[in-house]
Image: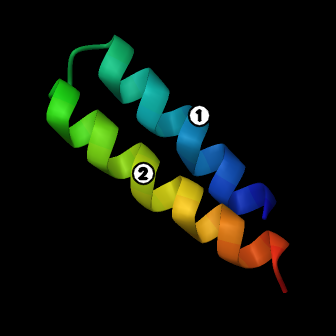
Amino acid sequence: MADLEMMQEEVRELYQSGLITPNEFQTSMLILRSELSKENNK
């Protein structure tokens, strides 16, 4: 789970740096949140 949270932070940094588009940011965060939810439900 810590890996997924770290990935979320890295995606935020990429977005804030302008290296990914708003759509890429949104899609990435949705996927990561979904995976976090799956981990929490185990």
* Rendered location of residue 39, percent (x, y): 75, 76
The three-letter amino acid code for the residue at tag 2 is Leu
The mark closer to the camera, 1 or 2, is 2
Disc 1 to disc 2: CB gap under 8 Å: no
Left or right of residue 40: residue 24 = left
Q: Which mark is residue 30?
A: 2
The answer to whether residue 40 is above or below residue 28 is below
Local crowd size for mark 1, using a 10 Å CA cut-off: few (<14), some (14–19), many (≥20): few
Q: Secondary structure at mark 1?
A: helix
Residue drawn 31% across the image and 13% down it: 17
Q: Secondary structure at mark 2?
A: helix
* Rendered location of residue 40, percent (x, y): 82, 70
Q: Foreground residue, 19 or 28? A: 28
Residue drawn 20% across the image and 25% down it: 22
Residue drawn 69% across the image and 66% down it: 37
For the question of whether residue 20 can be seen, the reply is no
The three-letter amino acid code for the residue at tag 1 is Glu
Q: Which mark is residue 9?
A: 1
* Rendered location of residue 11, percent (x, y): 43, 37
The answer to whether residue 3 is above or below residue 7 is below
Q: Quadrant of residue 36?
A: bottom right
